[in-house]
Amino acid sequence: MVSFTSGTAPFGIAMGDVNNDTRQDVVVANYGSNTVGVYRGNGDGSFATPITFTVGTSPQSVALSDINGDGRLDIVVCNYGSTSISVLRGWGNTTFSLQTTLTTGTNPYWVAVADLNNDTRKDIIVSNYGSNTIGIFRGFGNGTFATQITFAASTNPSMLVVADFNSDGRLDIAVAILSSNRIGIFRGFGNLTFAAQVTLTTGTQPNWLVATDLNGDNRLDLVVANRGSNTIGIFRGFGNMTFSTQVTYATGTQPYGIAAGDFNYDNRTDILVANYGSNTLGVFLGYANLTFGPQFTFTTGTQPLAIGIGDLNSDGRSDVVLSLRGSNMIGVFRGYSTIAYSAPVTQAVTANPFAVVIADLNNDNRNDIVMSHYGGNSVSVRRGFNNKTFGLVSTITVGTQPWRMIVQDMNKDNRSDIVVANRGSNTISIIRGFGNFTFSAPINIATGTTPYSVAVGDFNNDTFNDIAVTNYGSSTLSLYRGYGNMTFLTLATVSTGTNPNGIVVADFNRDGRLDIMITNQASNTIGLFRGLGNFTFLPQVTFTAGTQPTSIATGDFNNDNLLDVVVANYGNNNVGVFRGFGNGTFGAQVTYSTGTGPYVVMVGDFNRDGKADIATSNFGANTVSILIGYGNMTFAPQLTFATGTGPYGIAYGDLNNDTHIDIAVSAYTASALNILWKPC
């Protein structure tokens, strides 16, 4: 989130192009300073310094509309403390006239602008919280309005929406009734008169409403924020002024503003909610049948209230603007294609699983799962059946305390083999796969002390896979030459920083030779060993990382065809991103928060937008974090998804052939395999 200073206690937000430059601007009602602030958009998600205009006392809700037909947006704001509406005529250049005022009922809470009588002139509708009425000001099309006419509502009407709920071409009104836990529905007759109120039962203290078609049936549904019960309520509309009973979803504390739109571009309507009491923005992804996924959240400033939606940088994606009452700011979240995952589906396994790998072990075009079991001195193989189930088909005894592993074809027979580092017995185990879920007995090769991670690559360009291992206890890197027939020669031991852990192999300087990069956990660095293509490497060059870097991955984070690096900083609860310059050098680390204790980091395109994203397993938080990439070396705030207790290993792939990326997690403490399924 990027924040911009506002007046005191900002409340309502409206968005539109107030100066006709094709860029979205923002108008905010500053409740505590009796002003509205106009933020001219720069077209890149930033704003010019706001211009403020004086209005009445305690302005609460603001609307933008051309009320006089001059092609320029005007401002209409209701002043909760002064029993009035302020109208500011726009000049089309982000400046506005002095206010003219309209007298309302007591404590006007919310304002809307619409043509209620089909005369092509804009009228004003207001909920009068203190006098328990709805007020209507007939517009004359020249910026002036008739005296308010009112009709009775229930006690304390708050947020209102104006929409055609029965498709008769006449606008109706729905209003949240805060004190009686109801929504009031008023059928419009197209002549500024309305039928008596019909009510719907909500949760406690409904204070915000949105009318939208949630399920694509061309009928308007209602979404309400129930501030007192910490829920949103969904009412299915039947297109005849009647609605289903409420279906609720848990939010954060004291939900206020809500908004609806397709925020992940799957042609399904999603819901946003500002959680005033917990300082978060909640996201509910829609599943097209009027059901929604569980809330995931983004941290905001203090006391988020209203939500505005618009494309602030003309990238075709919806951005979010929040009024942050307690921070005296507005906050902007740049839009991107977001994602959702199911709650973890758990399968019990044995003996503290650590690493997890997804691969097709029998060439049936279905992904299988391989896990190392630290407490059982074994590797397990689970066959995928393409129906979200996995069956244990093999358990292979390896060395003591197997840690990380890799699945790769080590002998060019087009069958997947397994290489695992056994940290307790100071060996690696190489297991030949026969392509039918059977495996040879492991070949055990000595390493340095406490081997942690293993990587595979052709380090001498002979077309055969070689092996590199980080030895945490002896602070060395072991190199093994492969001969393509499951035999390996211990070739070299190279000094590293203190306690090397993670490892990745890639050509970081584009010379056609593989390099090795590691994390030095106790030195708080990453180390690059530049390969010379003949199984020799230049001495380590280090780059400063965060505290206790445990894992490393590579990807192109800015689409410049140069490899960048990301590291999990276990001790700082973040990931560090290093921009690669294609010559073996990297920019300084830029960090992004994760959950507590990120241990394994991986790179993938989780939302299929063609831009690299980052995921971590957070051992201390029992979560997986996903950071969506913008394709310019920056990332959105983390999305978190619950796992079992003590997640270490993490892998991704399509586990049921539905073309969506699923996530497998090894829950070390719980001795479980967790699958986070990506909904269709």
Image (tube, grey):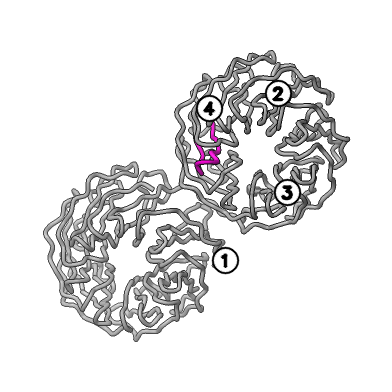
Q: Amino acid at mark 4?
A: Asn
Check if mark 2's residue and mark 1's residue have beta carbons within 8 Å. Answer: no
Secondary element type, mark 2:
strand
Check if mark 1's residue and mark 4's residue have beta carbons within 8 Å. Answer: no
Which stretch is magenta?
563-576
Camera-side residue of 159 and 460: 460
> Which residue corresponds to the image point at 78% horizontal and 26% vertical from the top-left?
446
Secondary element type, mark 4:
loop
Which circle's residue, 1 or 4, is located before the other in the chain?
Answer: 1
Q: Amino acid at mark 1?
A: Asn
Residue 644 in percent (x, y) is at: 65, 55
Which circle's residue, 3 or 1, is located before the other in the chain?
Answer: 1
The residue that label 4 is drawn on is 561
The residue that label 2 is drawn on is 478
Secondary element type, mark 1:
loop
Q: Main secondary structure of the magenta part?
A: strand
Q: In this picture, is 649 found above or below 241? A: above
Camera-side residue of 453 and 254: 453
The residue that label 3 is drawn on is 352
Using the image, tell me which numbered label, if any, was put on residue 289. 1
Answer yes or no: is residue 220 visible. no
Which circle's residue, 3 or 4, is located before the other in the chain?
Answer: 3
Check if mark 3's residue and mark 2's residue have beta carbons within 8 Å. Answer: no
Q: Which mark is in front, 3 or 4?
A: 3
Which circle's residue, 3 or 2, is located before the other in the chain?
Answer: 3
Q: Amino acid at mark 3?
A: Asn
